[in-house]
Image (cartoon, rainbow, N blue to C red):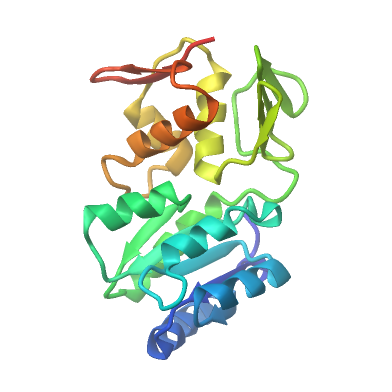
Amino acid sequence: MMDAKNYKILLVDDEPDILEFISYNLKKEGYTVLMANNGKEALKVAQAELPQLIVLDVMMPEMDGIETCEELKRIPELSNSMITFLTARGEDYSQIAGFEAGADDYIAKPIKPKVFISRVKALLKRYVPEGESSSEGLEDEGNKITLGDLIIDRERYVVINKGEELILPKKEFELLVLLVSKPEKVFTRDEIYNTVWGDNIIVGDRTIDVHIRKLREKIGQDVIKTIKGVGYKYVS
């Protein structure tokens, strides 16, 4: 893990008091803090600065956090950046919408500094610098995994399915790499949570289901099988 001073964290919120409060606590830890007041400004700052972590408020005027997250995920240079939502909304819907948009975590207001910093550190431990791979235990050579019509380029974070190139959100990509690493092996939900999200991250019960559904929409409904009450497997 890099030293704190080498990390850039972009805060996006339309409430100046929130920005000031979070910024103060992050700077105390040695992080470089960037700020934006809305989604459109966030896109400009993110493209210029390439932060390792982006903290997004959900409820913002003009472009809300969900839409901003989706736009950020379309920028190839930010494919490795971690994204977490910060919002007062606690409904399951907003959490599911956030994960569907490609977010890595979800932090609720009101903010407790120690808890917030702990979540930030846990997220940054999972950050993968450009050109590196977070997947472990794979026996293939090089940075490419080939299985039938599916090619996974771990160096470029690109998936090619039947000749079509796909750029998946980070968690979808890591989930696919895990399942493809051992075709026909049933990965339990606990294994998936711990490998893809990490045991320090608290996510909703439907997080895996949402990501599996998104993967099926992109690479085919039949390649990932649900083993009821256990988990999922990739069918080669």
Nearest the camera: 171 or 93?
93
Q: Position of residue 8 (x, y in %)?
A: 62, 70
Left or right of 159 on screen, residue 235: left
Residue at image coords 50%, 42%: 171
Q: Position of residue 13 (x, y in %)?
A: 44, 78
Is residue 129 visible in this depiction of the protein? yes
Q: Position of residue 41 (x, y in %)?
A: 58, 78
Residue at image coords 60%, 56%: 81
Nearest the camera: 176 or 7?
176
Is residue 30 visible in this depiction of the protein? no
Q: Is residue 142 above or below residue 7?
A: above
Q: Position of residue 149 (x, y in %)?
A: 66, 16
Q: Is residue 198 above or below residue 209?
A: below
Residue at image coords 52%, 12%: 183
Q: Is residue 20 above or below residue 88?
A: below
Dividing the picture into quarters, in which one does residue 32 lie?
Answer: bottom right
Nearest the camera: 18 or 139?
18
Of the 4 image quadrants, the one containing the N terminus is bottom right
Q: Is residue 77 above or below residue 214?
A: below
Residue at image coords 47%, 71%: 63
Left or right of 114 on screen, residue 1: right
Q: Residue most toward the front? A: 62
Of the 4 image quadrants, the one containing the C terminus is top right
Instruction: State the count of labels.
Output: 0
